[in-house]
Image (tube, rainbow, N blue to C red):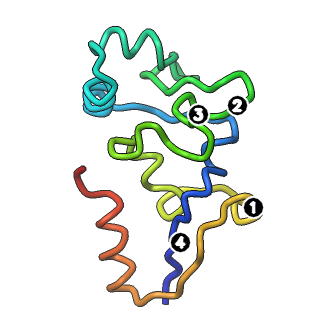
Amino acid sequence: MAIFYECQRCTACCRWPGQVRLTEAEITRLAAFKQLAEWEFIQRFTRLAADRRGLALLDKPDGECVFLEGNDCSVQPVKPQQCRDFPNLWNFPGFEKICHAIPHQVSEDEDRRLLAGLTGPL
């Protein structure tokens, strides 16, 4: 049996500092969603990744994601893959103390099906 975490959209994962890396396709999609040219989107909402190998989303001064508005993600329909994959395809020790995702025991086949839904195209 596997554990699949059902996201409750509590936004706890959006409130700690970190690094949400962006692919070129995600930048294109996010810029279009925000109705901005890609260059303008990059200037307003990204920074150089810590390893200097690409771009990551900016954090607000308090560590929150730049797209967190109250308890909502302002880019939910096009949010980056890294965000969509949490906490099932990546997490960190102790994330359960912060994240309100509901763990469900599922069969290996069901786990594969659910994970494919997370990582599939938008």
SS at mark 4?
strand
Nearer mark to the viewer, of 3 and 4: 3
Name the image quarter holding residue 29: top left
The residue furthest front is 70
Q: Dot 3 corresponds to which residue?
A: 65
Q: Earlier in the sequence, mark 2 or mark 1?
A: 2
Q: Is residue 19 left or right of residue 118?
A: right
Give the percent coordinates (x, y) of residue 56: 49, 26
**Labels 3 & 4 near each other (Cβ < 8 A):** no
Dot 4, crowdedness within 10 Å: few (<14), some or many (≥20)?
many
Q: Which residue is mark 2?
A: 63
Q: How far across and down, in percent of the image, does residue 50 sit? A: 58, 23
Q: Residues within 10 Å of mark 2 (few under 14, many from 20)?
A: few
Name the residue carrying label 1. 94
Would you identify the image quadrant in which residue 85 lies? bottom left
Q: Of marks 3 and 1, which one's residue comes earlier in the chain?
A: 3
Q: Which mark is residue 120?
A: none
Q: Residue at x 34, y 25 (%)?
A: 34
